[in-house]
Image: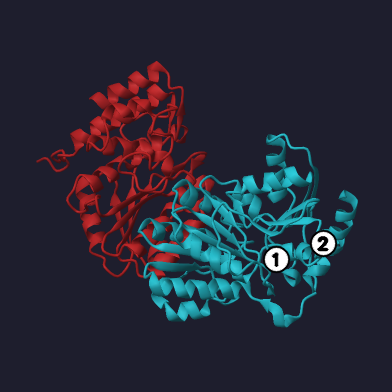
Amino acid sequence: MKLFSKKPHQLEPLAKQLRLDILNMVYAAHSGHLGGSLSNLDIIISLYYSDIFNFDRDHFVLSAGHTCLSHYAVLASLGKFPKKLLNTYTEINSIIQGHESTDVPGVEFSSGALGQGLSFAAGLALGDKDHHTICLTSDGEHDEGQIWEAIMFANKYHLGNLINIVDCNKFQIDGSTADIMPTDELAAKYLRFGWTVTSVNGHNYHDLHKAIVKAKNSSIYPACIIAHTTLAKGISFMEKDYHYHDIKDMSEDIYLKAKHELDR
Amino acid sequence: MNSTDNLHSIRQAFSDTLIDLAGENLNLYVVSADLKSSLSLSKFASKFRGRFIECGVAENNAAGIAAGLAKSGKTVFLATYACFSPGINWNTIKQSICYNNLPVKIIGSHGGLASADLGATHQMLEDIALMRSLPNMDVFAPADALETAKIIHTVSHSPKPAYIRLVRPSTPNFTNSRSSFTIGHSQILQTGSKITVLGYGPILNSALSLKNKNLEIINCSSIKPLDSKTILSSIKKTSRCIIIEDHQKNGGLGEAVASLILTHNLKSKFIHLAVDDQFGRSAKNYFDLYDLHCIGQKELIRTIKNIL
């Protein structure tokens, strides 16, 4: 009996390749926000590699702009721009900058300062009611008061076409969210603020797909998906270690060790 | 100083113009932060209910909502007090509006010491500095109700983000009703050959009402982009320059003009009448505050005498 074995999801080989792309970007550039980009990658893949939304019409807003590596890797994999541009991450003449930028084909909102994306997404959802707006926030950025202003606003204006996916990796730049500023019971908080809420494993494509479809079908209430994820997912010695929120000058040893794990 | 019969509300001119524009432009939205009645927007809100978006006392979210609406193709006016927007939400304006280059029109009402009785917290003396430092942002400040209508009309068609500073009190109309407003252009309110007086907003009337023929008075209502051509040519002629503004010296129009003068190697006497690194305070009459901070008509008369 194979109670715990599951067939790998068809998207897992892609995710593996994109994790490598992200690692390579950070290694080549000598810096980059690896932890959050690896925790939210599966969420972004779930959104773009399904037929739930059409991002030529629907909108995607990455609020935590430092995690742009995963969004860029996904956009490149879809042919939005040549994949070789990923190798120019943070170079002076590159469109692939250190934070999410509309210079990159497929990006609708430049971000970097935390807490602003959900307001923008709510405004966009209000202005374009014929389509869906999906915002991806992080749990850490829920420290920002503006997020809560936007949560109240979306409830007031019944933005049923707005979805906020929270990448809950439970860490931020200086430590765990529990230490820096507890953001526990986020699901209950969203519920009390008038949103529909689903909690999922943010690395499980089946669960993510179901949650996203359910959120899309919420036509009166704004929908929140609490996606429980692992910081730096896929590289065991970096996982859940906040020092890998961002990395400067990754040594060759560390790079090869991480690459070896992702290559397996 | 003026008979109340001849005073006109700049806020009312703003609101009336918006109502006219909204009748033609069905995509025109107003985003508010719980100061609808203070900005004379109650009529707009009841007439165009679906296009009046109330965010509550939450200026950062309001700026983000405005940016998102603009992204969806709406013409958006974000309207509240200047001390809160950009006073509180400057980074949201920087990132969500300017960096994303979205054509939100930010109305900062109650600018300057002119919000007399409200005191230092509500007397916004730093808005021009904050906004002219932002890439992509245009900055305007109408001199009177007549010019307010023209500026609101013009910016509603502009593809760029813009900040428009309004003041609270009703003030005299002293600009030419027949002249048009063009972004990047100033208006010579009075020609003269001895002293160039530059400024923006109703405070300029303190120079014009002197009826001193030595003064060339230029209304710099387009603070950014600034009409460097007209300003430089006047200073070249007069070699004397007084800048008067209801704003901090730091980051104000005076510094922009000083930079122009130095960059173009002009020789000119230069006096900047502005609030000198201080907070305001409450007063019954804003002209008393102008005198207290040495930006009133008495100080202007003294300065003119000294500079000649």
Q: Residue furthest left?
A: A1
Q: Does mark 1 fall on the same chain as mark 2?
A: yes
The hue in which chain B appears in the rendered picture of the protein: cyan
Callout 1: residue from which chain? B
Amino acid type at image mark 2: Asn
Amino acid type at image mark 1: Pro
Element class at badge 1: helix
Q: Are marks 2 and 1 in contact (CB under 8 Å)?
A: no
Q: Residue furthest bottom?
A: B5
Q: In the image, is B75 to the left or to the right of B2?
A: left
Q: Which residue is mark 1?
A: B202
Q: In the image, is A109 to the left or to the right of B205?
A: left
Q: Which residue is mark 2?
A: B212
Residue A223 in sight: yes
Q: What residue appears at the point 24 percent right and 60 percent down from the top-left corner? A: A216
Q: What residue appears at the point 58 percent right and 64 percent down from the top-left corner? A: B179
Element class at badge 2: loop
* Gap between marks 2 and 1 measured at Cα: 18 Å
**Where the N terminus of chain A falls, by quadrant?**
top left
**Quarter location, residue B139:** bottom right
Relative depth, front residue between A102 and A238:
A102
The hue in which chain A appears in the rendered picture of the protein: red
